[in-house]
Image (spheres, rainbow, N blue to C red):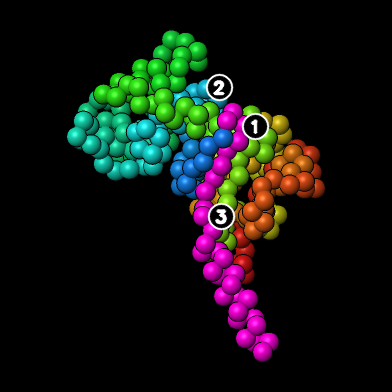
Amino acid sequence: MVAGGVYTAVAFVQRSEVLITERCTADGAGSAELATDQAANAGLITAVAVRRGLPARAASIALATAMQESKIRNIGHGDQAGPDSRGLFQQRPSQGWGTSDQVMDPYHATNAFYDALVKVPGYEGLDITVAAQRVQRSAYPDAYAQHEAMGRAFASALAGHTPAGLDCSLRAPDTAGDPAAVEERLSAAFGGVSATTEGSTLVLDAEGERAWALAHWAVANAKGLSITEVQAEGLGWTRADRNGWQPAGVPAGQVRITVAGSDE
């Protein structure tokens, strides 16, 4: 009976995990929801803006643009209007955005978008759809407007302007994580980060908006990097609990990112 009870409990947990709808939600400048792969790409796009010292408005424009162009996915094909379009922003090598390989590199593509955006006079004060069209020169110039709310919500959270503003509901990780891999991806997105490792936890020195930008990036990338817990500014996000950010005893000035161990 005991063995049967254990089997039943395990089977119930496994079924419960399968039934979980994985998604990420941003609350701050409005509320919006993305799939986990979209949220990870949104984290990269916003992190590059933070690294360049651009305002959250730039990230809002970039996110709305990427949603319209590719659903914020790094797709390797174009459409009838732009058969050589590729990547997050559907940039065309034939129009000077880079080589085919470059426009498929999310970092190159995002920086190329911002390079063009900052040349638009007064882009910070333009409607998002107007600013996006000045960069993209799309055949559908008004299409970006439908994604403005999503762009604002995720940019605000991922830039660190909305504390505890990003939450992801995820199943248990399938594989162990690696703090070194998390640090490598963080550094690629934000530039060099000051970090140490304590077992399965990466410890970053950051506070205020910087802390929340790093913490929200980690939550947005939790699925792909097998992150199980993130702590910042007195609050913690725990993957298994699925109840958002809760009070936590994290030391001041630290962001702590914990990955799944090999026995989880």
Q: Is residue 18 above or below residue 208?
A: below
Question: Residue 68, how many percent across, how many down?
Answer: 37, 32
Q: Which residue is mark 3?
A: 170
Q: Nearer the viewer, residue 70 or 242?
A: 242
Q: Residue at x 39, y 42 (%)?
A: 73
Q: Earlier in the sequence, mark 1 or mark 3?
A: 1
Which region is colored magenta? Answer: 1-30
User: Which secondary structure lies at badge 3?
Assistant: loop
Tally of numbered tags = 3
Q: Is residue 4 above or below residue 161?
A: below
Instruction: Look at the image and tell me whether residue 131 can be seen.
Output: yes
Q: Which residue is mark 2?
A: 55
Residue 50: quarter of image: top right
Quarter of the picture holding the N terminus:
bottom right
Left or right relative to 99: residue 80 = left
Question: Residue 18, how many percent across, how many down?
Answer: 51, 64
Q: Amino acid at mark 2?
A: Pro
